[in-house]
Image (tube, helix red, strand yellow):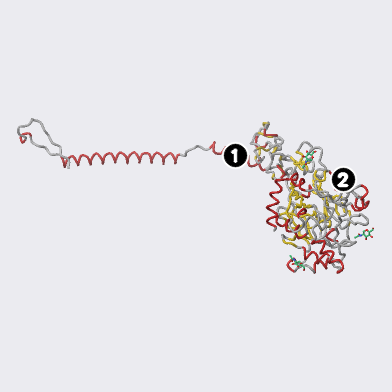
Amino acid sequence: MATSWRQRWLLMVLTGLRGWQLGITEARVSTDVLLPYAESHGPSHSHRHVRDCQAVTFGTRTFESWPSSSHDTLPVARSSVFISDMPGGAESSRWVYGHMTVVPDPLRQLSVLEPGGPGGCEENPRVSVEETAAPAGCLYAQNAGFFNITSDGCLGNVVSDGRMVRDSGGVQNAQFGIRRDGTLVFGYLSQEDVLDQSNPFEQLVSGVVWLLRNGEVYINQSLKAECDKIVDIELFREFVDVRSARTAVGHDVNGNVVMFHVDGQTHKRGMSLWEVADFLKNNGVINAINLDGGGSSSFVTNGTLASYPTDTCKPGSRWRCARHVSTVLCVHRRRCQPADCSGHGVCTASGCLCAAGWRGERCTEPCLPGYYGDGCRHTCTCFNGAFCNHDNGRCTCPPGFYGNFCEKVCPAGFYGLSCAEECACEDPCACDPQTGSCNSMSNRAVQCLGRRRQKEAYRHEPYLTEQTWLIITLTMASLLLIRLLAHFLRATRRWLLFGFSYTQVPLSDVKGEALTYSFLQLH
Ligand SMILES: *[C@@H]1O[C@H](CO)[C@@H](O)[C@H](O)[C@H]1NC(C)=O
Ligand SMILES: *[C@@H]1O[C@H](CO)[C@@H](O)[C@H](O)[C@H]1NC(C)=O
Ligand SMILES: *[C@@H]1O[C@H](CO)[C@@H](O)[C@H](O)[C@H]1NC(C)=O
């Protein structure tokens, strides 16, 4: 069944919202409040109980963590409309409609908002998602946690943009949170986990039922962990099994947060939590919890309600108008955008992107000494106390030094900045390369003197001694003699050869021929 949903979902996304709206004519009444427990919210048993009642394979960990995605470029969430075929009910309620919203960089783009803004959880205003989302500039928004239908107050833990709004006191319900370092957290938390200050929660909200754990449906285990009251268990099972409007939140393998919303009406249309879990699993979600559902399942795009209104929310029906909710999941630019990046960077949705050599939230600070370049990631190589340009890493040499890395001392006779000054000392070796003073007794001056003495010593000594002359003359004479001897021997050898091979033919022996023929025969 799951595969066919997916295929149809893809198809239906193409057809879009307009086509679907044409097919729906049913009007809804405003009485759809689906709650997991009769009047209260969740079990108050200990964290230890939750740990003890979970499968051994999960060890002592009662929640899962995942690093969230983050990037420097403009992050824009993607939201797709889906329409799913849910056979089994009446033909008119077969097709359900919802949104899947993938939020990259959730640390900077996702907020849990109190209804109507900060303080709303205590003041308990009945404020719709649209009303909460508009002033916060949410591109996408949907229902988050549950609320108390008697008092209208928020339920469970709530942390909104780093502010601890509500501490449930360890009530064990499925949680979704984002810690300060961007870690996504799904599952059951002890009160210590919630109040942890080393890596505190930036956002935290309570749902009911952990849908997916490590890519597997976790509903039955979740029922056991969350419901300790026998009287409630039947009601709780019905809450899970019944088709209704739903909202959920999860994450994919890349650490993007996935927001899920499906419209419906309890007992008539929508999805059971089993179906929601399967849907999310088939769309690559790894951990997910169920959030508020029932009628409190609105999806808002750019301040406008995009979900099918399950209730009419007439002004007089305040009490049962289920779209009136508590907390909201909002996709927006979390950080107040800096007006400028001090001229050393560009503004992006996630803050300033600093130019090479600059750092800080508004790019006001140069790299720390010894570092330069993009993100101040490069290490300077400048010697002799040279100044390193934080932008390009070039070295500016102090007086007395030169070279690309200021690794060389000025040549003798020169001193000062860029070795541009000429020494006015009687002895250039005694010239201080930094100040030009003529009494330098530095190591360098001593070496310079040593080198000069060596040179002078060479100059005063004759290049060749008498003995050397004698050796050279004798050698030349011997070479000359050897050569003469060789010549003599060669000449002698030729003479000998001629002596043996020369045959004289007497002229009288040659008959009838010309008079003078001689033959040379070489043997
Ligand atoms: C809901 O509010 C009522 C009235 O203030 C209160 O008595 C009840 O304990 C609250 N329920 C929860 C779960 O907080
Ligand atoms: C969940 O529990 C119910 C009742 O105990 C059982 O019928 C069902 O098969 C279980 N489902 C899963 C996926 O374990
Ligand atoms: C939201 O509204 C703004 C301004 O009205 C518009 O430019 C933008 O395209 C809208 N975004 C969506 C996703 O509708």
Label 2 to label 1, Cα distance in Å?
Answer: 91 Å
SS of the residue under disc 2: helix
Asked whether 66 or 124 is in front, the reply is 124
Observer-nearest residue: 52 or 239? 239
Q: Quadrant of residue 473?
A: top left
Q: Name the residue beneath numbered marker 2.
A: 131
Residue 113 image offset from top left, x and y in percent? 85, 49
Report x, y in % for residue 68.
Answer: 75, 52
Placement of 489 over or under 174, stated as above or below: above
N-term mark: 2 or 1: 2
The quadrant of the rendering that contains the C terminus is top left
Q: Residues within 10 Å of mark 2 (few under 14, many from 20)?
A: some
Q: Label 1: which residue?
A: 453
Q: Quadrant of residue 356?
A: top right
Quarter assignment of residue 429: top right
> Which residue is at the front of the view, 242 or 486?
242
